[in-house]
Amino acid sequence: MTERVVSGIQQENDSQIDYTLRPKSLKDYIGQTKIVDNLKISIVASKQRNEPLDHTLLYGPPGLGKTTLSTILANEMESPIKITSGPAIERAGDMVSILTRLQKGEILFIDEIHRLNRTVEEILYSAMEDFVVSWMIDKGLKARSMNLPIQPFTLVGATTRFGMVSSPLRDRFGSVYRLNFYDNKSMEMIVKRSIAITNIEADTKGIVEIAKRSRGTPRIANRILRRVRDYAQVKANNKITGIVANEALTKLEVDEIGLDNNDRLLLKSIISNFKGGPVGIDTLATSISEESETIEDVYEPYLIQIGFLERTKKGRIVTEKTYKHLNIKSPKKNSSDQVSLF
Ligand code: ADE
């Protein structure tokens, strides 16, 4: 499947631009106000005590700023940061090596922390709790465990799958925050900020149009902004207006609420193949040739947030809103009309 303009997952072309547009301090960070307020207090308190921050778990859909927040935490704490990910740490020895090299107060950011394997994860337990790494040396009869002290550090874990983080690991985080989709006002401010940093010319209507089609996700907004800028450069003298943004996004088949062909295919499949649901996730995934995990992580969170999809015990169902948006007649409406006839 080609890369989606409206996917929150990081794509190859995003990394450079994401980096330049990423806020570096909490004062430049827009939205997620409850989390930001709590973090501000934690930062001041741990600085006053001269201790590292509490281990922090950030979860939520991709593209909302989990990595950004962790680099901001490091900047605010004036600490170094080591960035890695669950699948990248394959063996217990790799984890031991990372932990024993950490400096005092360093932030260890592990993205996709739910994908750590068990033996690697178990090394983290005593490291997080007591700043000690237990490590087996020798084999067979001579095997014994050695406790290596490590520097006090802060683990920042990020995941799109809170439910897949094991409870022993989850319980060792002092703070757990869920990142939510950004509201429209915050998205407009984020787009405005990106426009100012990258010297793009855009009017308010252009900004509003991009913001409202970005699914409450800064990474998507910044990606869309790039595509609309290209369009404006070729077709509209470099100026992004509401009309120009609308034209560019219509060409990319992103509709006025940020749904693309993939979303529409998924929703229409539930309607036409499964009578609106309920349908199990795996059956649905097969019907649109997509992986269940991608549906759960990338498609669903936003469709659920805007009330187009519901997860029930029996499976996924679409709602009246979905029928209305897709301009398809709802069977429910028909049946209730019929009932009212009698
Ligand atoms: N760029 C990406 N995420 C952002 C945020 N939350 N605030 C400001 N700029 C951003």
Image (cartoon, helix red, strand yellow):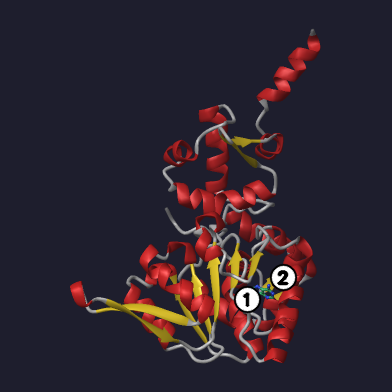
Task: State which image quarter holds ligand 1.
Answer: bottom right
Identify the residue shown where x is 37% and y is 83%. Answer: 97
The answer to whether residue 112 is seen in the rendering is no
**Is the residue marked 2 within 8 Å of ligand 1, measured from its CB?**
no
Q: Position of residue 10 (x, y in %)?
A: 50, 67
Query: Which residue has dot 1 on it?
Result: 69
Going by the numbered disc 2, the residue's amino acid type is: Ile
SS of the residue under disc 1: helix
Toward which corner of the image does residue 181 lie, by quadrant? bottom right
Look at the picture and state if 261 lies above or below 183: above
Identify the residue shown where x is 70% and y is 48%. Answer: 306
Is residue 102 shown left or right of residue 179?
A: left
Identify the residue shown where x is 71% and y is 77%. Answer: 39
Q: Nearer the viewer, residue 251 or 273?
A: 273
Q: Residue furthest top?
A: 342
Q: Quadrant of the C terminus?
A: top right
SS of the residue under disc 2: helix
Q: Nearer the viewer, residue 4 or 108?
A: 108
The answer to whether residue 158 is seen in the rendering is yes
Between the C-alphas of marks 2 and 1, the distance is 10 Å
Query: Which residue has dot 2 on it?
Result: 35
